[in-house]
Amino acid sequence: MTKIGRTIIAALVLGTLIAGLSACQKKEGPLERAGKEIDKAAEKTGDKIDNAGDKLKDAVKDMKK
């Protein structure tokens, strides 16, 4: 077999494997979606706590003046 023939066969095999593996990806299940929503809620809560802490610091600084 020539070098070009081997390269073409290798490219075809590699392409087939990549296509096959990408088709195997599963869609998110309900638990994964719920977990993502919990993560988002926790992040929002953390942001609000940070904002409240900043406001508290500002209030304490204003009281000291």
Image (spheres, rainbow, N blue to C red):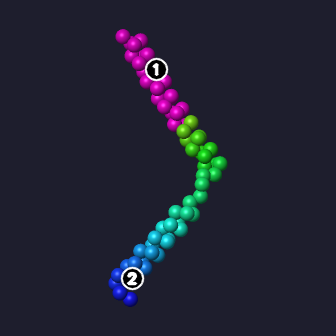
Q: Looking at this rendering, what residue extends furthest in the right direction?
A: 30
Q: Amino acid at mark 2?
A: Arg
Along the line of sight, which residue is nearer the eye, 32 or 11? 11
Along the line of sight, which residue is nearer the eye, 12 or 35? 12
- Name the quarter where the N terminus is drawn: bottom left
Q: Is residue 59 above or below residue 39?
A: above
Q: Main secondary structure of the magenta part?
A: helix
Picture coordinates of residue 32, whole percent (x, y): 60, 49
Q: Is residue 3 above or below residue 59?
A: below
Picture coordinates of residue 49, whole percent (x, y): 50, 28
Q: Looking at this rendering, what residue extends furthest in the bottom direction?
A: 1
Q: Is residue 12 above or below residue 63?
A: below
What's the residue at 55%, 41% (across, down)?
39
The numbered dot on residue 6 is 2
The numbered dot on residue 56 is 1
Residue 12, quarter of the rendered image: bottom left
What's the residue at 39%, 13% (across, down)?
62
Q: How many other residues sit within 10 Å of disc 1, few (<14), some (14-19) or many (≥20)?
A: few
Q: Is residue 14 above or below residue 6?
A: above
What's the residue at 52%, 33% (across, down)?
44
Residue 9, quarter of the rendered image: bottom left
Q: Is residue 60 magenta?
A: yes
State the SS at label 1: helix
Q: Is residue 1 shown left or right of residue 34?
A: left
The numbered dot on residue 7 is none
Q: Which residues are magenta?
A: 42-65
State the SS at label 2: helix
Q: Is residue 31 shown left or right of residue 16?
A: right
Q: Amino acid at mark 1?
A: Leu
Q: For the residues labelled 2 and 1, say whether their Cβ atoms are less than 8 Å apart.
A: no
